[in-house]
Image (spheres, rainbow, N blue to C red):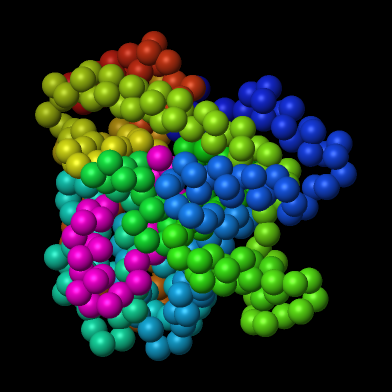
Amino acid sequence: MIPIAKPFIGEEEIDAVTAVLKSGTIAEGQKVKDFEAAFARYCGTSDAIAVNSGTAALHVALLAHNIGNGDEVITSPFTFVASANSVLFTGAKPVFADIDENTFNIDPECINEKITPKTKAIIPVHLYGQSANMEKIMEIAEDNNLVVIEDACQAHGATFDGKKVGSFSTGTFSFYPTKNMTTGEGGIITTDDKSIAERSRMIRSHGSKQRYFHEMLGFNLRMTDIAAALGLAQLARLDGFNNARIRNAKYLAEKLNKLKEIKNPYVDSRCGHVFHQYTVRLESNLPRDEIASLLNKKGIGTGIYYPLPIHKQPYYRSLGYDDSLPVSEKASLEVLSLPVHPAVNKEELDTISSAMQKILS
Ligand SMILES: *Cc1c(COP(=O)(O)O)cnc(C)c1O
């Protein structure tokens, strides 16, 4: 079986985690500090604040920016539900703006249509490893005095105009095992704003700067040193992982280009795409489920990210969401992701492309 995702854990990771276990300091300590410094350096930001999931990173970033009751936050409906759930948990209201049909990322024109006097922030999601149009989004934010929180949970190392995602404004990343690098579970917030960094650190740890003195409301969302040691080893490999994904995606695109029933990923010339997912759009008469099951029978793992846009999810319907967002709705019916993670080799890519050719011919 060629799985749709697979974390790479080598000897360095095992040694790094073992060393932490032997040291006796296993909760948040020096390793977390080292990981934060290394991740901030990687993204080109002054600060990074490690937490225990990508969802926590989004939630903390929103709270650090004082977003809550009565506020509206514009985001994409075509993403993992965490992008919007984190907004709901602050008491603010997620407002969905439709996506661009080529990149699957939030369409800046649609953001403009959704701005009201209550709008406080925009959460662009860099879906599948490709940056949203950060030039336009930062312009809109500036013109309307809005906060930007990048959901870069699928885009570690991706760039827009040569600049790393997570460094345009406040950034959030996930280290779940299927992502481009992992800490088991984990997340991080990146920022150049010292006051946002300080507030994020406090919210992560019960609102305290000094132990047992609490200046604001917070949670326990800390990362462990065990996870941070894993993260340091993975970060050292991240560019290598991403290059392997890019190489695999390029190879697969060349092989699949001839098939007129599928549309290969569109790469914006201003973007450094890191292919968290290699997602094609199916334009075949054969139903998507059937194509996926035929691929699965040949030992090829597939994914559908995402089969139902957030505004159509039962919970969101129960809250009264009934938007019509046709580009997202159409995409959710047509997308199919194929494996390009670093463990996939050329032979397996050939297997995938010949299976695809057979199924669609
Ligand atoms: C994975 C992911 C998250 C949430 O990260 P967790 O670590 O699973 O909490 C948020 N947004 C997007 C786009 C993601 O892919």
Out of 148 and 261, give the one closest to the viewer.
148
Out of 123 and 93, give the one closest to the viewer.
123
For residue 164, what is the image quadrant? top left
Instruction: Where is residue 251? Give x, y as percent.
Output: 28, 19
Residue lying furthest top: 347
Image point 40% across, 53% down: which residue?
Answer: 166
Image point 61% across, 66% down: which residue?
Answer: 201
Residue 321 visible in the snapshot: no
Instruction: Where is residue 55? Give x, y as percent.
Output: 53, 60
For residue 92, what is the image quadrant? bottom left
From the viewer's perspective, is residue 61 above or below residue 225?
below
Instruction: Where is residue 321? Give x, y as percent.
Output: 33, 77
Q: Is residue 69 magenta?
A: no
Image point 21% across, 33% down: which residue?
Answer: 264
Residue 9 visible in the snapshot: yes
From the viewer's perspective, is residue 129 above or below residue 360?
below
For residue 133, what is the image quadrant? bottom left
Out of 308 and 144, give the one closest to the viewer.
144
From the viewer's perspective, is residue 38 above or below residue 114?
above
Image point 42% across, 67% down: which residue?
Answer: 84
From the viewer's perspective, is residue 273 above or below residue 94?
above
Of the 4 image quadrants, the one containing the C terminus is top left
**In the image: residue 109, left or right of residue 280:** left
Instruction: Where is residue 38? Give x, y as percent.
Output: 56, 42
- Number of marks drawn: 0
Q: Is residue 134 magenta?
A: yes
Which portion, as a residue range, is magenta? 132-157
